[in-house]
Amino acid sequence: MLNSQLIKKMKTMNSIKRYVTISFLFSLLLMACTSDFLEYEPEGVQTDDVFYSTIDGITLGVTGTYAGVNVCPASLHNLDMMYLAFGSIASDEAEAGGERGGGDIIDFQNWDKGKPEVSEPKSVSENFYAYHYKTILRANSTLGGIRLYKENNPDTSTDSLALLNQYEGEMEFLLAFEHFKLIKVYGGIPIVDHALGSAEYGITRNTVAECLHFVQEHLELAVSLLPKRSEYPASEMGRATKGAAEALLGKAYLYESSYAENYAGDARFEGCTNQYTKAAQYLENVISSNEYELVGINGETFDTYWNQDDSPMYTETPGYRYIFTVDGENSKESVFEAQSLNDGFAYMLSRGTYLTVYTAVRNTGSGSHGWGFNCPSPMLLNAYDPEDPRKMVSIGESGDPIYISTGWDTMDCIDSPSNIMTRKFEASPEQYWSNKGADGNGPNNFPHIRYADVILMAAEAAIKTGDNAKALNYINMVRKRARNGAASGVPADLSSATFEDVVTERLFELSMEGHRFFDLVRWNKTDLMVGQPLQTYLGGVPQTPPFTNDFTQGVNEFFPLPMVEIINSNGNLVQYPGYN
Amino acid sequence: MKNRNSLVNQKSSFKTMLLLVFLLVFQFSVFAQEKQVTGTVFDESGETLPGVNVLVKGTTIGTVTNIDGNYSITVDAATKELLYSFVGYLDQTVAIGNKSEISITLEEDILEMDEVIVVGYGTQKKSDLTGSVASVSAESLEKLPSSRIDEALQGKAAGVVVLQNSGQPGSAPAIRVRGLATINGGSPLIVVDGISGGSLANINPADIESIEVLKDAASQGIYGSAGGNGVILVTTKKGKVGKLQTKLDIYAGLQEPWIKILNIADAQQYAAMLNQYNQSKELEDYFPQNESGQYLNPENDEVLSSTNWADEIFRLALVQNYNLSVSGGKENAKFFFGTNYNAQEGTVKKTSNDRFSVRLNSEFKLFDKVTIGENFSVTNNVRSGTSERNEYSSPLSTSIQMLPFVPVFATDGSENYAYKHAGKSSNIQNPMSQIEYSNNQGTSNSLFGNAFARIEIIKGLTFESRIGISMGNSLYKSFLPVYVIGDEDNSSPSQSNSVSTYTRNTTSNSSWQLQNFINYSFSIMEKNNFTVTVGQEAGASKYEFKNTQANNVDIETDEWMNYEKTDSFRVLGEKPTPTSGYAYFGRVTYDYDGLLLFQANIRRDHSSKLGPNNRVGNFPSASAGLKFSEFDFIKNLNIIDFGKIRFGYGATGNSDIQPFLYLNSMGPVDMTGYAFGGVTQEGAALLTAANPDLKWETVLTQNIGTDLRFLNNRLGVTVDLFSRKNIDMLLRKSVPLTVGYYITDAFRELGDAALDTRPLVNYGTLNNRGFEVTVTYKDQVGKLKYNLNANITRAVTTIDDIGDPLYAGSGRGITNVTRTMNGMPVSAFYGYKTDGVYQEDDFVWYQGKGDRWISIAPDENGTNVVEGTYLGQDVSYNVTNTSAAVGNLKYIDTDGDGNITVADMVQIGDPNPDFIFGFGADFEYQNFDLNLFFQGSYGNDIFNLMKVNLYTVNNGSLNLSNDLINSYIPATYNSRDKTVAPELVTEARNTDSGILRMDGDLQASDFYVEDGSYIRLKNIQLGYTIPLAKTQKMKIQRLRLYVGAKNLLTLTNYSGFDPEVGETTILERGFDRGTYPQSKMYTFGVNLIF
């Protein structure tokens, strides 16, 4: 409160004085802040450059990249299962299965019918594609981190440098591995060899040949950097090895050669050349390394869970069954397999796989069980010699014994469109069914490359390079192991080997494991699929309407790129002809 | 209700204060210059009015009336007019002429237009406002017993939407000012006593003096980037000069859950429906019946009895509230002390919230010109809760879905909970077991307040400096023991728990804020009045959390809270998040003779959260107003007592994101570990991409409004039209999948933002348009004083430029029900439109392949051709829906392609209301008072996820709606014989019911969409004040007793627990996964003033 005199005095006061007072106060305020005030060393957040500045950080980055190999991105779409859907369900060896009625996971059903949907807005294919590129980003960013570390630390110790080289080799391997899977499914895809910045989002697709050459180049680098399998301790099984890189490299050359041989004049494969010699060379390297063997070829048997005896633990399990059991994971037959573990965690956190529950029979005599996908086709059932021991591992039928949580029971394939189920990815109640925390806790590793595959690829390369005798030897090795090393029996040794024998042997040996579709495509033998009747039975009743495989040659060799990616690319990515 | 300061209720202390003010003024006695004017000021009832300001108009020269209402003022000879003003009364200007004695009567300002309200960094007369501000006084809230002030605000102010997300004690409602603030959340800025960043949860409602909600850019502008989501200014009570006043308020109440009678079956109804279903499938009856028609347990032929699961989980719950305040002061020292204990049990067993708070506000005058003070409160809150909004694992949803004949406990005599009975097992967990085994307690402590100094440099020019401090910590503990569900020898492995889990999460936060600003009011040439505010603000905060967990913890359940072996805990997540910012701001208000009003704000904000390239943002706004009722030609119409139009436009901002999001980040989160050789090793990966260009989200706001008063100021109307446009929203954007940052299905399923790794960029536009109307009416008829008030708000929100639709709303086998797409409302419901149920007549029989008889629903528009024979003739039909079955929902082929596909999904509902409203009335008759308040929402839809399984019988493991008792049951045929034409076995039943058969296929459809409109009697309170004569002897100034009820009545057609479903996120609203219902609360209370 001021009296009127003071007010008058103020009014006559020099206005400059007032201004000075205000400016003085205000200048105090302005001093309070500079832009430094906003700068923080990030807390609780680690940027990539900080993260990769230690070897521990790089180690975590490497592991994080592996995690992408069998990730369970969502409850319904597990990468292992998606891969099976492309490689097996889409081929003539399997039907989609799932819930009775043929509507369960519509993408699987469409692929089974040879009619992949182009316009499905959110699809399994989108997840498959996206998660591979997510892993590719991880591999690229870790590779960038490793190289930066080497550059910034020229005096790294020899031991550390060896570890860094191993990591670099592993990341090169995974970069190639993920690209190669995408190539098999989609054909020419965008090659991504570094973490993309926002200016590089308008990426386009490369040709199949460019992609394969990229894969080969990076695998050759991986071969030069990676240790042998035997150089890793048991606790590190599952890491990429020199053998795995060589096997995959052999496969990449084999694919390129097959494409070149079987699709002359097809624009999609332009630039692919005959590389059988190189394929043979790398596959032979794997064989001559003596790092691997066909488990059971010498007659050994194993103690493991197998539904063939009245006790949960069967003591005379032959090698061909053993390698698919949880106990047989990372055996000497394993060249590269995706690692899974029942750790009981919720599905986003679990290192398990959905593969187990997806491929288990839907019903047993006493009730519901698994989800019943990837059912063997009648063609496969009829193709096997009934005496071939591989048949009962690949195919189970209603009434076959199955050991479940409540004890012995029988399989009931009533929901399978083909009335049969595969038994390659079973787990025991102790390993999964009784103590899983979530469906995605499946413990089964997924065999991406096993030694039998290498042997048969080597046989194929041998035939293509004119060495049929060598091929015969290889095929008979596989058949001998199928008999678990017995001198005679089914399957009997062949007396001569042709390319067709390789085709048949790959079906018998590698059935239901996600190889068949890609093999038929590269061999241009897709006419085996065209018109094949599908879902012929359901609960023993023929279904209406009946479906046949509508595979269109010249189009369906590759699946359409996910619709959302076409949209995201603003027209930079285009579908192959036939998918518009 | 007289005026907002509750002065009438405290008249005696008020008079004392006036006397003191008068005495102070008197000290600066005025020297006579030219002329002395004297007089007396009266109110309308003829009482004299002390403390009235008497000013020479256009100056600050003046005096106040004394305790007898007399005044004496010396003025220049040139002085023409005197201005008389007093809080709660209308200003009056009187020409002096040659009079030396002027006595006047002041008219009561019935609508308080001239009250002074709090605005950003200052105060303003309400009549001079050019922006849109809703002001809610403590008085209008104090008759609504609420433990939280945000809850009490519901329906009280136009344009302020308070969304009750839960009836759970201690749960926070969502507040939205004028539609949706922004797509990524965005709550209004809470400013408590000038310091921003407060929490409404920690404020004792009884400590609040007033709440102002700033609704448009003109009013929010001075808060710049922080103001974009609306600003809520909370002013707490301050001490007043006068004798010590002690107030004690106590109430106690009983709550019961507000549950509409749910249409779910009891055991007998369920059995009847299951048998009917079996009959329709040509299967044997499952439940046998006795002679009197009762259904029996097939295992032992006992009559099935029901468990009412809702009765089991709910209870009558107590609430009690004790509030004590002491205030008072002398001229140079004033204080307000308040303390509160609020204890609320929840209506779901084992839920509760207890809060204890203490506040001390004080103010000291050091010298004539310097005032210092502080406002601080500390709060302790202890809460035990239950999970909700979870269709599988919350007792609220399972109590709806649990089989009605399953008993609470297993029948083997163990203390286990049951899951199975009569050979049928439930596939959800027993609701009581969920309550029993969920042990949790969250304790939080907070301190929030400020210290300030105010210096009056010269008359009209003040400098104020405030420093705000906020500190808090919380500890959340929960324990899940090992338990078995079901009989010991027949338990459910999937529902039992074999590994105990102990969770221990802690948070801590601390922040400071410094404000310095100058307010300067002056006039130029008498009629040109200016107020200038210039200032600066800076602050920093740090929030940290640490989530830990231990498994296989070996403790007794009743001892769980004392477990402190923290070394056995593994860290699940840990993160400190520091932020800082500073700003300069300024405001100029100008009015010409109180007629033409103008205001401009500018704020320049700096924030550490944004990318280094874009950390600075400028937010200007301007507004203007015209008091057109001041024009003589309007005055002469004698229709309008007061009229003002306002227009404002401006920009505010939003940076409501976590810090460091402009950087890329790596970490060990989900899906980065890998099991080499059977042992998991931890991994890490790039989680998010860097974006150094991350910048402010800008909100452009326009407002045009008018304030009108009619009928001798009894009727007041305020109308505002508004539009808000958010541009450059802070959103994660889909990039090509090739880049490697992918919006995952898991993110869509779990809604966990941490799983969305797409780059955060500025894009997308959100539009809000709407209007608000507030009408008040105040009058007195004889001894009955009353006032009526009503408000209505309409806000239409649409979104644009977001690229990919944003999905949410999945559960119970139905996915992506809510979608947010360009040009559409936010989070509208999508699914199939239905056209009733397939009837027998829709179907024909034919022999397909294998000679089997098949029935299909032909449709000439269909593109699926089926061929076969009928009685030897080849037939061919077109079919639209290949999976059609009699009794199932008939989906409409909206795109007309002859096929039912996902492309036929269209918008089937909208959770956004057409309008929301509140209306209330206060009556006072002698010593009685009555308060009524209604609140509601109209035109919003709810997707009732709970209903999805209530209509699907095929697994027999969940309860059913008893709507199905008379549901349509199709005829049965002996079609299983492949060779004979189908013959009717059983006639169809209930063919006119139109209700679907119990064999539904789980698709999102409009069948599950319900009208969520409601009107709720939020509050009713009847009070009686014991006459002063009786209480004075006990030295009690006021003693009021009251009874009341909250949520006593609700009118709605919604069939779930409660139509106030609220939101899970902005993208999932009105999606009922089982929400904790609001409670009905009956209270009895006492207000005492000593």
Image (cartoon, grey):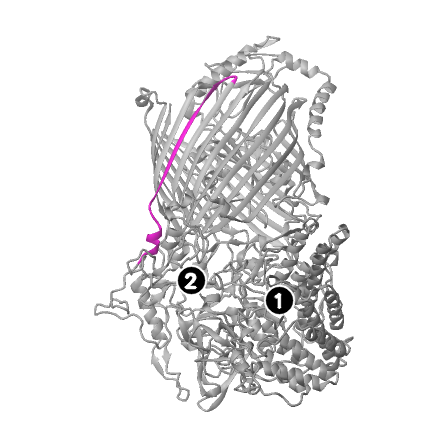
Which of the pair A106/B64 is nearer the observer?
A: A106
Q: What residue type is labelled 2?
A: Ser
Residue at 45% across / 71% down in the picture?
A369
Give the quadrant of the C terminus of chain A: bottom right
Residue at 49% across / 28% down in the picture?
B109
Left or right: A547, with A555 as reference point:
left
Which of the pair B934/A305 is nearer the observer?
A: A305
Mark 2 or 1: in front is 2
Left or right: B387, with A551 as reference point:
left
Residue at 71% across / 26% down in the picture?
A27
Q: Does the magenta stretch include residue B165?
A: no
Q: Is residue B562 above or below residue A272?
A: above
The residue range painted magenta reads: B307-332
Query: Mark on residue B494?
Result: 2
Subunit of label 2: B
Kindly identify which residue carries mark 1.
Answer: A128
Crowd around label 2: few <14 · some 14–19 · many ≥20 (10 Å)? some
**Residue B168: % across, % down:** 42, 46
Q: Marks 2/1: CA distance?
A: 30 Å
SS for tag 1? helix
Q: Which amino acid does label 1 sit on?
A: Phe
Residue at the extreme left of the image, as rendered: B291
Query: Mark on residue B790?
Result: none
**Residue A262: % across, % down:** 72, 82
